[in-house]
Image (cartoon, rainbow, N blue to C red):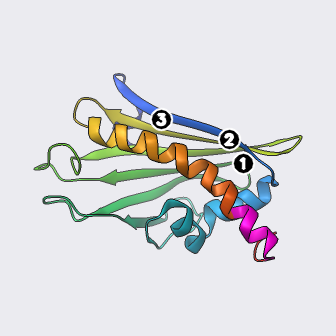
Amino acid sequence: MNDAAVKSGTREIAVEEVLPHSPETIWKALTTGDLITRWLGMPTTGFEAVQGKRFTFQTTPAGKWDGLIRCEVLEVVPNERLVYSWQSGHADNVGYGSPLDTVVTWVLARVENGTRLGLVHSGFVLPNNDTAFRNMSAGWKKVVPGIGALVTDEVSSKKLN
């Protein structure tokens, strides 16, 4: 785990949603590269649900930051928990594109009507990460329910079961 995610004085984003699909089906959406690209809205390169695997997301560059989000899978418990680091930004940027060293944790729990999907994105150091924290707080609140919508579409078209 990275240092920023465990320091006191950091903030986290937490989102939880009950989705009408099994944990196994939601897990496929969280761990399949092309589906991650679709629900996150950023190209994903090199993702595998294997501890130690490094991968990237690509977003809009800002200042000296190239727009790459560099990640490493930290923990994998199939159909239950996925944790990865999320590092981006550049030291010369202020606001959007400033250095970010955080951790994303997905937790899946079977419930009567499907799966409770929880996301915690932790380690935002304020005030340096104010812009990222604000933008990503709003973004994750759309992304998590969007995973459910994507899975529903994939299941109904028989691409995902």
Q: How crowded is mark 3: few (under 14 residues within 10 Å), some or many (20 or more)?
A: some
Residue 80 rendering spot, x and y as whole percentages:
72, 48
Say whether marks 2 and 3 touch (CB < 8 Å): no
- Extent of the magenta region: 151-158
Q: In which quarter of the image is the N terminus?
A: top left
In this view, the residue in front, 8 or 69, is 69
In this view, the residue in front, 50 or 130, is 130
Q: In this view, does 159 lie above or below 110?
A: below
Q: In this view, does 71 lie to the left or right of 25?
A: left
Residue depth check, mark 2 versus mark 3: number of the one nearer the observer? 2
Secondary structure at badge 3 equals strand
Residue depth check, mark 1 versus mark 2: number of the one nearer the observer? 2
Q: What residue type is labelled 2?
A: Glu
Task: Name the residue that disc number 3 marks.
Answer: 13
Q: What residue type is labelled 1?
A: Glu
Q: Which mark is residue 17?
A: 2
Q: Which mark is residue 139?
A: none
Secondary structure at badge 1 equals loop
Q: Is residue 74 left or right of residue 136?
A: right
Task: Name the residue that disc number 1 marks.
Answer: 80
Q: Which amino acid does label 3 sit on?
A: Ile
- The residue positioned 81% from the left and 50% from the top of the image is 20
In this view, the residue in front, 143 or 72, is 143
Q: Is residue 36 visible?
A: yes
Which SS does the magenta portion mostly show? helix
Measured Cα–Cα span from mark 1 to mark 2: 15 Å
Say whether marks 3 and 1 touch (CB < 8 Å): no
Measured Cα–Cα span from mark 2 to mark 3: 14 Å
Q: In this view, does 26 lie to the left or right of 90?
A: right
In the image, is residue 81 part of the stretch drawn in magenta? no
Residue depth check, mark 3 versus mark 1: number of the one nearer the observer? 3
